[in-house]
Image: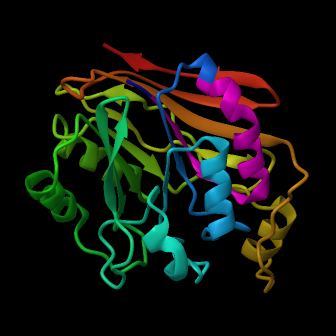
Amino acid sequence: MKILFFGDIVGRLGLEAVASLLPKLAQKYEADFIIANGENVSRGKGITERDYLDLIDAGVDCVTLGNHWNSKKQIEDYIEDADRLIRPLNLLSFDKGVGSAVFDCDGVSIRVTNLLGTAFMKEDVRVPYIALREVLDHEEKADIHIVDYHAESTSEKQLFGHFFDGQVSAVIGTHTHVQTNDARIFPKGTGFLSDAGMCGADDSIIGFNVEGAIEKMIYGKDNKLSLDEDAKPVVCFVWMEFDDETGACHFIRPVQYIGGNEFYGEASI
C-alpha cells in the first residue's frame, strides 16, 4: 500500500497548489490513499465546509486537523456529515465528529487517527497516549494505521513514535509547518517523521507574510498575520509504503516541491 501524507495546508494558495499537483503526484508515486492536514486551509486557521469539499474533490481521501480545528465555527454544523474529516481524538470539550476512522482501500483497511500533543500547547486535551491506547484496545483493528500527531515538540513526537513502535504503521508529525529530515523506520516497523511540513507560501513565516510577522513579533504591533496568496508555493508531503498484511512500514520519504523542483530524503528496510 502506497500512501501520500500532505503537511499542513495553509490558505487557498496551499489548497490550490495541492489540487494542481495531486493528479501528477498520485500517478508518479502510484498512490493508493491520500491524507492531508487541513487545519490551516481556510485563511490560515480552521477549515470551512467549502475548503473541506474542495480537498476531497481534488483527490484527498482523508483530511486531518489540529489545534485550529474549531477556528471556523461552522465546523459544528457540518462535521457530523463529513465522513472523511478527522478531528483530534483527545479533545475534552467537543464530541462531534470522530478522531479516528477506518477507510477501505481496495480491500485493505486503513485507520487514520488524529491526536493533539501537550508540550507547549494550550488546548485542554486527554493524555494522547491513553487516548490512542483505547483505540488500539477497543476499536476495530485495521490492516494499516496512520497517526497524525499534531504537536509542537519534536522530542514529544519522537517519544510517541517509539512508544507505539510496532503498534501502528506510522506516526507523522504536523503543526510546526517545517519539514524535518529525520524520516526513519523504528525496529518494530513503525514509520516516523517529526513533521511533514506545509503546503503554502514558500517565502514566508510558516505560510504567513514575512513583513507582517516581523511587525507583530519583533516590533509588537497589534496586527493580524496575513497570507500572500500570490506567492510561489511549496508543497510538502511524505511518501510511504506499507505491507498490506502486517501493516509494517517498508519505506518513508519526505518530499518537497518548490517551483517545480523536487527535494527529498528517505528511509527504507
Q: Is residue 67 visible?
A: no
What's the residue at 72%, 42% (across, down)? 19
Q: In this image, 108 relative to 204: left or right?
A: left
Q: Position of residue 242 (x, y in %)?
A: 33, 24
Q: Can residue 254 be seen in this view?
A: yes
Find out whether residue 95 is within the magenta segment.
no
Residue projecting furthest to the left: 137
Q: In which quarter of the image is the N terminus?
A: top left
Looking at the magenta stretch, what is its main secondary structure?
helix
Q: Where is residue 161 in the image (x, y as percent from the top left)?
A: 27, 43
Q: In this image, 226 relative to 190: left or right?
A: right
Find out whether residue 23 is within the magenta segment.
yes
State the image quarter where residue 128 is shown: bottom left
Q: What stretch is highlighted in magenta?
A: 3-26
Looking at the image, residue 266 lies above or below residue 92:
above
What's the residue at 60%, 26% (across, down)? 26
What's the residue at 82%, 59% (across, down)? 210
What's the residue at 70%, 41% (across, down)? 18
Looking at the image, residue 244 lies above or below residue 53:
above
Q: In this image, 174 relative to 129: left or right?
A: right
